[in-house]
Image (spheres, rainbow, N blue to C red):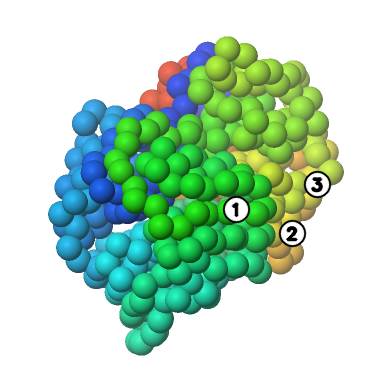
């Protein structure tokens, strides 16, 4: 089984090029189903989740292939509205294909994506939104049967769900009549999807804000598009600067999409600057604890950075409180950090993190994607060797993380370990 071997203690310094965002590329590929003509997405990261999405699209009859770091997709030959069971179960985020498949074929058949390591991941907001647009949806023994011609609607989301907002955008652009989404997700990846759809001929206004207007009846053509860079990968890499006492420049990082994280780094005493097309973070002594980190929808502190921030706070000077408001089971990394000498106490959705001077290398196991990345950060800032197991989780969201950190001076390799 593959693992990362990390010998910590080296201050990391230098420049790292940030890859395209997994959580932007995935919905853009789904939107390709709506286009009459091929699309080309440049600067895409080679990740398991993206390969899975390509296999799903191929199973629906699309032509999809890599061209170096670009993806070429032509949905002209798409003929099936049935999502392949195994593939869609492996990647629950495929649920945002429901909208485009339904819009394209007038029907769709999906298996319930089910939960994952971080929570139950319900899809009620997706289904209620599509029903509001005229879809007849029957749920039967784990299968979801949808059919109907979609029409515009006024939709209010009880919770600003990223995936549900993306599903609605993709279902609404070709629906009969206009749609308005209230309490929409404001994440940058939603704005990127709207920008892509408009580049293909759609009329989406207000994405990035809480109310989005979508003109219906669009005839979408293909286009070439470069997805936005990954703000979570950038945040993960930049946290390694205070974790190791280093100085890191993340080229391609967009500070405007990362303000909540950068603000916490400043509160911890780091020097944070926006420079020539990226963001630089310099450590200044031991990071200070922060009173509170609360995860909430964008532009608040992102849940996808909670684990990584907890790893950093574990070494900070003082006690911090971390509250995870988005997912119900996203503290699995805390136990593994404590095995490295951290002092973290969990009570429901709240973690009390009492900073310690030193973390010690240990053999630890990733339990989910961002928790695994947090353990890598802890290993980089620990004394001695850390082995991080189950790195397949990490490979879902980071392309060759070991190469990124080694390029900044880390003693980190991908190794084989006995199961
Ligand atoms: C997206 O997931 C991201 N995934 C997640 O990133 C990210 O953590 C999440 O947004 C929040 O920012 C992709 O974009 C592929 P949500 P999504 O719908 O769309 C509840 C990663 O690490 N909810 O905004 O599934 C849900 O239970 C992944 O890259 C409902 O109750 O997130 C959760 O508590 C992990 N009903 C909250 O909303 C619904 O119908 C946030 O979910 C849908 C969601």
Residue that badge 1 annotates: 212
Rendered location of residue 372, percent (x, y): 49, 46
Q: Is residue 275 left or right of residue 78?
A: right
Q: Nearer the viewer, mark 3 or mark 1?
A: 1
Q: Residues under labels 3 and 1: Cα distance?
A: 31 Å
Q: Earlier in the sequence, mark 2 or mark 3?
A: 3
> Residue at 76% of width from left, 40% of height from top?
355
Question: Which residue occupies the foreground of this view, 351 or 116?
Answer: 116
- Corner quadrant of residue 349: bottom right
Mark earlier in primary sequence (3, 1): 1
The residue at 43%/65% (across/down) is 176
Secondary element at tag 1: strand
Label 3 sits on a secondary structure element that is strand
| Label 3 beta carbon within 8 A of ligand 1 | no
Q: Earlier in the sequence, mark 1 or mark 2?
A: 1
Q: Residues within 10 Å of mark 2 (few under 14, many from 20)?
A: some
Tag nearer the camera, 1 or 2: 1
Residue 256 in sight: yes
Q: Residue furthest bottom?
A: 140
- Report whether the residue tagged 2 is closer than 8 Å to ligand 1: no
The residue closer to the viewer here, 229 or 270, is 229
Residue at numbered disc 3: 292
> Does 282 appear above or below 227?
above
| The label number, if any, that marks residue 350 in the structure image | 2
Kind of element beneath mark 2: strand
Residue 17, by quadrant, is top left
Measured in 3D between alpha carbons, the distance from the residue under mark 2 to the one under mark 3, in whole angstroms, is: 10 Å
């Amino acid at each position: 089984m593959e693992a990362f071997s990390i010998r910590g203690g080296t201050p990391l310094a230098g420049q790292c090029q940030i890859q395209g965002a997994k959580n932007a590329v995935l919905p853009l590929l789904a939107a390709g189903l709506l286009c009459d003509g091929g699309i080309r997405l440049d600067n895409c990261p080679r990740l398991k989740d993206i390969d899975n999405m390509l296999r799903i699209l191929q199973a629906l009859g699309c032509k999809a292939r890599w061209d170096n770091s670009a993806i070429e997709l032509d949905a002209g030959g798409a003929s099936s509205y049935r999502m392949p069971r195994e593939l869609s179960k492996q990647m629950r985020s495929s649920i945002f294909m429901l909208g485009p498949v339904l819009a394209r074929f007038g029907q769709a058949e999906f298996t319930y994506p089910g939960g994952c390591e971080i929570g139950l991941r319900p899809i009620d907001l997706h289904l209620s939104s599509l029903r509001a647009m005229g879809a007849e949806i029957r749920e039967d023994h784990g299968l979801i049967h949808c059919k109907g011609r979609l029409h515009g609607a006024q939709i209010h989301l009880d919770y600003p769900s990223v995936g549900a907002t993306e599903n609605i955008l993709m279902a609404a652009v070709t629906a009969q009549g206009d749609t308005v989404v209230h309490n929409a997700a404001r994440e940058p990846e939603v704005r990127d999807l709207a920008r892509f759809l408009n580049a293909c001929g759609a009329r989406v206004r207000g994405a990035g804000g809480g109310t989005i207007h979508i003109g219906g009846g669009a005839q979408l053509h293909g286009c070439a598009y470069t997805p936005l860079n990954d703000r979570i990968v950038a945040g993960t890499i930049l946290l390694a600067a205070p974790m190791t006492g280093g100085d890191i420049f993340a080229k391609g990082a967009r500070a405007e999409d990362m303000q909540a994280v950068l603000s916490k780094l400043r509160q911890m005493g780091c020097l944070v600057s926006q420079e020539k097309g990226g963001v630089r973070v310099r450590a200044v002594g031991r990071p200070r604890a922060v009173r509170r980190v609360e995860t909430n929808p964008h532009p608040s502190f992102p849940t996808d950075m909670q684990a990584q921030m907890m790893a950093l706070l574990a070494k900070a000077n003082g006690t911090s409180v971390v509250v995870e408001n988005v997912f119900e089971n996203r503290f699995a990394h805390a136990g593994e950090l404590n095995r490295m000498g951290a002092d973290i106490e969990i009570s429901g959705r709240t973690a009390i993190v009492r900073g310690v001077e030193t973390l010690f290398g240990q053999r630890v196991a990733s339990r989910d994607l961002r928790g695994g990345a947090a353990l890598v950060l802890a290993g980089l800032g620990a004394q001695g060797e850390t082995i991080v197991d189950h790195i397949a989780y990490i490979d879902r969201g980071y392309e060759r993380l070991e190469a990124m950190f080694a390029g900044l001076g880390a003693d980190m390799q991908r190794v084989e370990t006995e199961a």
